Image (tube, rainbow, N blue to C red):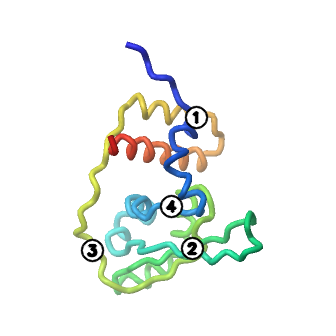
Amino acid sequence: MAMARVKPLAELIEACIGPAFAAQGFASTDILAAWPEIVGERLGRVCQPVKLEWPRRKRTEADGPTESGTLVVRVEGAFALELQHLVPVVIQRINAHYGWACVGRIVMKQGRVHSGQRRAPVSTIDPARRGEVALAVSRIEEDGLRDALDRLGIAVVASAAARR
């Protein structure tokens, strides 16, 4: 039985992230899944991201730096003030989670948060594939970037396995 060739992380994720990175965005399901990790379990139960709005690009900005987006968050009324005080920390955590300044501000909308939503089942990945991802990012010295790429690689491998 021949072992599969170890593929570079870029080769594994190229097809999956092309459209997302072209728009400098991320999938809404990704931020929903990571939300409790980003804001903490307590706040994660009383607020949730609704959408990420990007500023319109001017025609002359073809390859210029992308401006940060505005994250719209639905929050239970009683916790709006608490979240308002934590907005700078939440923005910092989101940006650290993704490895770049994707969110520049948060707009809160009061409303009921559906805490009884069914979560997508956590997919397990083959330990060998997990090892490939870990090996691919192991040479990256910056902790935040390495962790963000590790999470991205795991998500891509898991989604590819789920599609089979």
Nearer-N-terminus badge (4/2): 4
Amino acid type, residue under disc 2 in the picture: Pro
The crowd level at tag 1 (other Cα within 10 Å; few <14, some 14-19, many 20+) is few
Q: Position of residue 37 (x, y in %)?
A: 41, 59
The residue to which callout 1 is attached is: 138
Q: Nearer the viewer, mark 4 or mark 1?
A: 4
The amino acid on which the numbered mark 3 sits, given as a three-letter code, is His
Kindly report which numbered mark, 1 or 2, lies closer to the viewer in this rendering.
1
Circle 3: element type: loop
**Which residue position is annotated with label 2?**
88
> Which sits earlier in the primary sequence, circle 1 or circle 3?
3
Around disc 2, counting alpha carbons within 10 Å, would you say few (fewer than 14), some (14 to 19), or many (20 or more)? few
Going by the numbered disc 4, the residue's amino acid type is Phe
Q: CA distance from mark 4 to mark 2?
A: 20 Å
Q: Classify mark 2: helix, strand or loop.
A: helix
The answer to whether the residues at label 4 and label 2 have Cβ atoms under 8 Å apart is no
The answer to whether the residues at label 3 and label 4 have Cβ atoms under 8 Å apart is no
Residue identifier under label 4: 26
Q: Is residue 141 left or right of residue 47?
A: right
How much space separates mark 4 and mark 1, taking CA atoms?
23 Å
Q: Residues within 10 Å of mark 3 (few under 14, many from 20)?
A: few
Position of residue 91 relative to residue 81, above or below, is above
| Residue at left offset 53%, top offset 30% | 7
Q: Give the amino acid type for the residue marked by disc 1 in the picture.
A: Ser
Mark nearer the N terminus (3 vs 2): 2
Mark 4 or 2, closer to the camera = 4
Determine which residue is flagged by label 3.
114
For the residues labelled 3 and 2, the Cα–Cα distance comes to 24 Å
